[in-house]
Image (cartoon, rainbow, N blue to C red):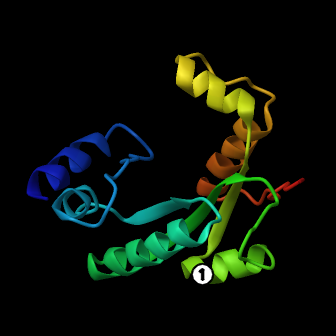
Amino acid sequence: PEIMKRMVSVLSRYYDHVLIDCPAGVGSGFMSAVASAQRALVVSTPDPVCLRDCNKTRIALEYAGVRSQRLVVNRFSGNLGAYRDLDAVIDASGIRLIAIVPEDAALAVAGASGSPAPLKSAGTMALGRLAARLEGEQVPLAVRV
């Protein structure tokens, strides 16, 4: 944790945002990664197993002192399975929503092949809206399923 705090402190002199992708689970790797966090984006797909883990992550972040948390619903297809609507998904996470990234085959193919993301794909545009929201802009979620 101390090394992460020093590293993020140095990086934050040069960048507006320092994003750290945490390891799965809430063990020592997770706690080291969040040691210097001021806020957190918790990414989850809208299925019960992932949302239970999302809720555990929320609790671990609070324990680590990270009170500013936002939910990114990833790979959203409109099929909510066990949930009646998007509000139920958000309630299950216990975290305030900031973005919805739709299921996007073009974005998945680009990621798997190491190619640039297609600029006009639904997933890429959703990530652009997420970036704008992180900067304080008021932009719509633009969910279409």
Residue 80 vs residue 66: left or right? right
Q: Foreground: 33 or 114?
A: 114
Residue 102 in percent (x, y) is at 75, 48
Residue lying farthest right? 144
* Image quadrant containing the C terminus: bottom right
Q: Foreground: 105 or 10?
A: 105
Residue at 79 percent of width and 56 percent of height: 139
Toward which corner of the image does residue 105 lie, by quadrant?
Answer: top right
Residue at 62 percent of width and 47 percent of height: 131
Residue at 34 percent of width and 37 percent of height: 14
Q: Is residue 62 above or below residue 26?
A: below
Residue at label 1? 92
Residue 22 in percent (x, y) is at 34, 52
Q: Is residue 28 above or below residue 57?
A: above
Residue 53 in percent (x, y) is at 44, 71
Toward which corner of the image does residue 15 lie, by quadrant?
Answer: top left
Residue 64 vs residue 48: left or right? left
* Label 1: element kind: helix
Work out whether residue 67 can be spotted: no
Density class for disc 1 (Cα within 10 Å; few <14, some 14-19, many ≥20) is some
Toward which corner of the image does residue 117 lie, by quadrant?
Answer: top right
Residue type at tag 1: Ala
Q: Is residue 43 above or below residue 12?
A: below
